Image (cartoon, grey):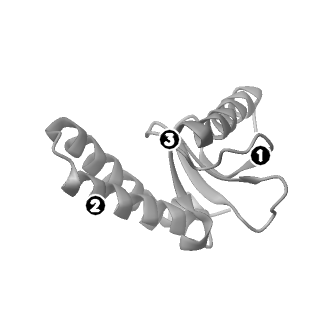
Amino acid sequence: MDESTKVWMRNLVDLAVRGTGEMNVYDEAMLEARPEWALPQRLLVGKVRPQMDPHAFHWFICGEVPLDYLPGNVATSPREALRHFAMKWQLDAERSTDEELSHALVENAEAIYALADDERAWQA
């Protein structure tokens, strides 16, 4: 992994940690976060958890999509998490009264769902 990708990932992990308070995911000061899967320079899926509770965590997604979180128990892998984010965003789009926001949510949902289905993205 090149240095620019490492910096990009570190910045997004930091963003995900800062966002937990703003989005009412965690209000604790001591959090741990780590990337789980990335499409470098485009998309990062990771986990964030309270430092004192190694079993509780949330998935996060960020990059070219808005920062968002899901409870850890909804997915067992980053690929499954992508599918859940896609479903969440589709539902959010249906509930939204903002047409522009709905359109963006649907576009992002369709893009990450397609990515989750693309075997090439998941080969080691």
The residue nearer to you, when weighing 3 against 7, is 7
Disc 1 to disc 2, C-alpha distance: 29 Å
Does residue 43 appear to the left or right of 114 in the view shown?
Answer: right
Q: Residue at x 50, y 66 (%)?
A: 119
| Disc number lying in front (1 or 2) | 1
Q: Position of residue 19 (x, y in %)?
A: 58, 37
- Which label's residue is closer to the chain start, 2 or 3? 3
Q: Earlier in the sequence, mark 3 or mark 1?
A: 1
Q: CA distance from mark 3 to mark 1?
A: 17 Å
Q: Is residue 102 above or below residue 120?
A: above
Residue 13 visible within the image = yes
Please give left or right for residue 29 compared with residue 115 in the image: right
Q: Is residue 58 left or right of residue 111?
A: right
Position above or below: 105 against 86: above
Task: Find disc 3 in the rendering and name its residue.
Answer: 67
Q: Quadrant of residue 21?
A: top right
Q: Quadrant of the C terminus?
A: bottom right
Tag 3: amino acid: Leu
Q: Alpha carbon of mark 2 to alpha carbon of mark 3: how far?
A: 16 Å
Residue 91: image tag: 2
Q: Residue furthest front?
A: 27
